[in-house]
Structure formats: C-alpha cells, structure tokens
Amino acid sequence: MYDIFIPKSEILQKYIHNICVMQAFSEAINYLAFPQLGTSIAFYKHTKIVLDENCIYLENNLKENTQVLLLGKYTLPIQLHFQQYTPEVSINFTATGLNYFFEKNTDEIASENVQLITSEIWTETVNQIFEQETSAQKVEVLEERILSILIEKDISLTENFISIMNENPEQTITDIAANLGVSSKTINRQFTKYVGCSPMEYKKIVRFRKAIQTKFSEPFKNLTQVCFDSNFYDSPHFTREFKKLTQLNPRDFFTQIDDVGKQAIPYKFL
C-alpha cells in the first residue's frame, strides 16, 4: 500500500519517523488507521476531501488543486475511504516533531483529530512534490522543502520527559516530573501544548504501539507475553485499553489487521 522512506537528512530524522508514498490501486479502499505516537501531514493533488468526525472521504476531482490534511492526536480509529486511487504523500512526525515546522504549536495547529491546512507554504509544497515522477524523487523534493522551513524551538522539557517515560515506563508521571525538577502541572501543560494530549493519554498509546511492535517482531509470542512485555498491568488492563483505542479486543485486533509495508504500521481493511 505504501512505499516507506526514512529521511536521508539526519536533521529531519530527529523530527520525522518516515515519509510514505501511496502505491497505485485499482479498486476503492476503506480502512481504519489506529492511534499513533506522533502526528501526520498528507499531501494530495486533484482530490476532494470531506471530513466527518472520525471519517475521511477522498475522491479524484480535477477542480480541486491542492489539499493538505493534518491528523492530530486522535485516540479512536480514523476511518479513511478512498473512492479510487488518489496519489498521496505523507509525513509521520515524532511526538513533538510537528512543532518545528510551524510558528504555532501542536495544540493550536492540530486542535481537531483531522483538519485541512490552507497555508500557502504547505499548499505550494504539494505542487512541487507531484511534479516528480518516482516515489524517491517526491521524497527528495519534500525533504528539501521542509528543511527550508525548519524552526528552532526549545521543547527539551517535554522531550526529556518522553525519553525517560520510554526508558522507564513503570515510573509515574509525578516521579518523572520530580526527576526533571518541575511540577506535574507544568509537565501536563507543556505536554498538551507540544504533543496535543495529556501524558496519561500518551502513555496509553505508547503501551499500545509497543504491543504492536512486539507482536509483529515476535509473532509466535502469545498475547499474555505481549501484554506483560508491553507494560500492561494484567490481561484485563491489556484488553480494556485495546478496546478503547481500537474498538477491538487484542485477539481480534491482531487477527484482523494488516502490517502495511512491513513496518509495524497496522491498518484494518473494511
């Protein structure tokens, strides 16, 4: 479904997980995308996009010139409906990566689960991308473009918090805040500003994504092993959080999803 590229630029690797170019397909595609650690921006040309709560409808439309879609910090699956193949190039940012390419911060840029961006800086980028023929050329042009708009910001407090939480997932938010010499209130405020959700909500997505990575990398592990390896307290906790984030229990989730691009990027096709 996607050609997946890691940025060649070491600078961009700090802010971007990967860049995806959609492969051509012949029939309509409907699928669910599940909560992720960062945010995403997707670029389209000659595409009509309709947003309806947690649903995105896309179809070819020559009257529409450029479209830029931003997916914020959603905590329920996003449903995407492609009526037919629509060329797409998307950037998957790290938890704080989006902030470095806008004057405003994530809580303002991505206030909704999904939204369209109309800024000329980004709509011009669409035209430059789709003038290129190959996926690699599109990605090269995109990297050059976004490097040119990179902004220096100090988000080190939130980024240090995330780093500690990833290394020591059993630590409480209060303990990590104390280790950083700030209050929990400060952490919550900064985290929401730069990540778009609370630390507790983010921690749930971290556990969820770790379970996916564990199961995909070690498919013969049973779900009880995946549960404890991913820092869930017990099986009921594992099931409860999966249902909240995916609307499926873990067994059904891992039975029904596809690993798109063999990169632990799970989608459920409908």
Image: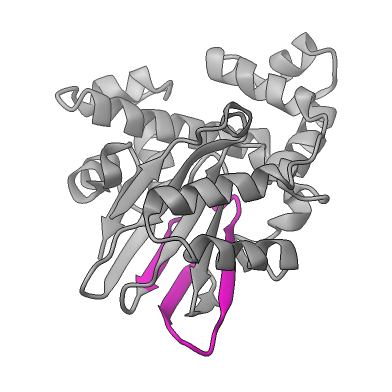
What stretch of residues is rendered in magenta?
A: 54-81
* Residue at 50%, 33% in the rendered image: 8
Q: Is residue 255 left or right of residue 85?
A: left
Rendered location of residue 186, percent (x, y): 84, 29
Rendered location of residue 71, percent (x, y): 56, 57
- Between 21 and 205, the residue placed more toward the observer is 21
Quadrant of image for the C terminus: bottom left
Residue 45, relative to residue 169: is it above or below?
below
* Residue at 32%, 37% in the rendered image: 263
Rendered location of residue 231, percent (x, y): 43, 21
Residue 39 can be seen, yes or no: no
Tally the marks: 0
Q: Is residue 20 left or right of residue 144?
A: left
Rendered location of residue 92, percent (x, y): 52, 45
Residue ranking furthest to the left: 220
- 76 in magenta: yes
Colouring: one colour
Give the quadrant of residue 143.
Answer: top right
Give the quadrant of residue 261.
Answer: top left
Residue ranking furthest to the bottom: 63
Residue 201 can be seen, yes or no: yes
* Residue at 33%, 34% in the rendered image: 212
Q: Is residue 55 left or right of residue 27?
A: right
Quadrant of image for the N terminus: bottom left
Residue 225, relative to residue 4: is it above or below?
above
- 205 in magenta: no
- Between 136 and 253, the residue placed more toward the observer is 136
Give the quadrant of residue 66.
Answer: bottom right
